[in-house]
Image (tube, rainbow, N blue to C red):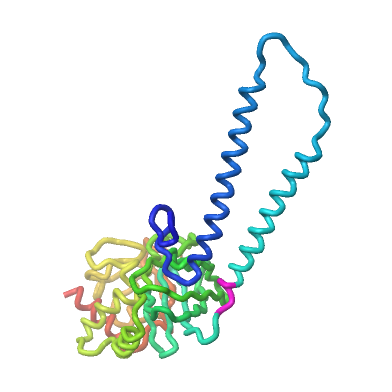
Amino acid sequence: MDSTGAVWLPEAASTVAGEVDALFYFIFYASLFFFVLVTSAMVYFAIRYRKRGKRVLTSSISHNTALEVTWTVIPTILVFVIFIWGFKDFLNLHVVPRGATEIKVTGQKWFWSFDYPEGLSVVNELTVPVNKPIKLLMASKDVIHSFYVPSFRVKMDVVPNRYSIIWFEATQTGEYNLFCTEFCGKGHSEMIGKVNVVTEEEYEDWLLENADPSEGLTMEEFGAKLYKSKACVTCHTIDGTASQGPSFLGIYGKNEQLTDGSSVLVDENYLRESFLNPAAKIVKGYQPVMPPYQGLLNDKEVDALIAYIKSLSQ
Ligand code: CUA
């Protein structure tokens, strides 16, 4: 039950976590105190003044000014303390410090993508340096999602057609869970990511290493890497079982029945169209839930994914 985590709350790993927890515990212990006080008084009076022996009539009591003033003033003070304290924390949580690194966050069914100022774009894994303020500029491509990192005590809705902003500064290195906390459809529970907090040097190295993610890989290997890093894995299996979308196993070269009754040969052109404009031709038995990857994949990445999917049909 301390601010480092343990019994109820997850580890506190950001600069604002301590403040948020302190207010939470204040409200919690104040509520507990008054709950015990009121309940004990109630039980005591019920026993002390229960009906015994001959019926005695209570004299008529209209009010008790001192008591009524007390039970009005104390809660009023408490409410104001909580309001002012909460408002102060609210400002701290919403006013982004100067010089924060700005990372663009996009929520879509059912993954997160992160765009760094250096031009790097990654999916589901946000890597940030420790002890540096990070500003997240967030938007959704489809429905409402919500960005939540429990250990940082930050949570914010991510909505289509507008930006929402939060910031945090991690205080220790490590791996933290990232959740979507707004029910956003069938794959909501799979919209899970990680925040990797690393040292400044590790962060610089990471940026360099990821500048060219295809380095040293064949097209198929690069495609296999993208299959995970671009979150295809969330909805498409490679073992033949159907998920949110058709499995990639053996799909290349197949004739697929479409929802409009026609059929299509799964070739390079169909795959490319399905990445960039997935709603164009939906395979029978599936919903048009995939977000367009237009802008999320460059030509080389499209080619690599096609090469990978082809390799799963040999
Ligand atoms: Cu996105 Cu739930």
Toward the top, the furthest residue is 54
Looking at the image, residue 102 sits to the left or right of residue 126; the answer is right
Compare residues 165 and 87 and report the one nearer the observer.
Answer: 87
Residue at 73% in and 11% down: 55
Predominant secondary structure, magenta span: helix
Relative image position of residue 193 (x, y in whole percent)? 37, 69
> Is 111 placed above or below 218 here?
above
Q: Nearer the viewer, residue 200 or 107?
A: 200
Q: Nearer the viewer, residue 168 or 301?
A: 168
Could you tell me how many numbered marks the image carries?
Answer: 0
Residue 130 in the image, given as x and y percentages of width and height: 39, 78
List the single residue furthest toward the left. 314
Where's residue 117, x and y in %? Answer: 44, 88
Q: Nearer the viewer, residue 19 or 119?
A: 19
Q: Quadrant of residue 273?
A: bottom left
In the displayed structure, would residue 48 be above or below residue 101? Answer: above
Is residue 129 visible in the rendered image? The answer is yes
Please tell me whether residue 94 belongs to the stretch shown in magenta: yes
Quadrant holding the C terminus: bottom left
**Residue at 26% from the left image edge and 78% from the top image edge:** 225
Residue at the spot 55% in from the left edge and 85% down from the top edge: 98
Quarter of the image containing the N terminus?
bottom left
Rendered location of residue 296, percent (x, y):
40, 82
In this picture, which residue range is highlighted in magenta?
A: 92-96
- Residue 270 at least partly seen: no
Does the magenta run of residues contain 213?
no
Locate residue 167 relative to residue 50 in the image: left or right.
left
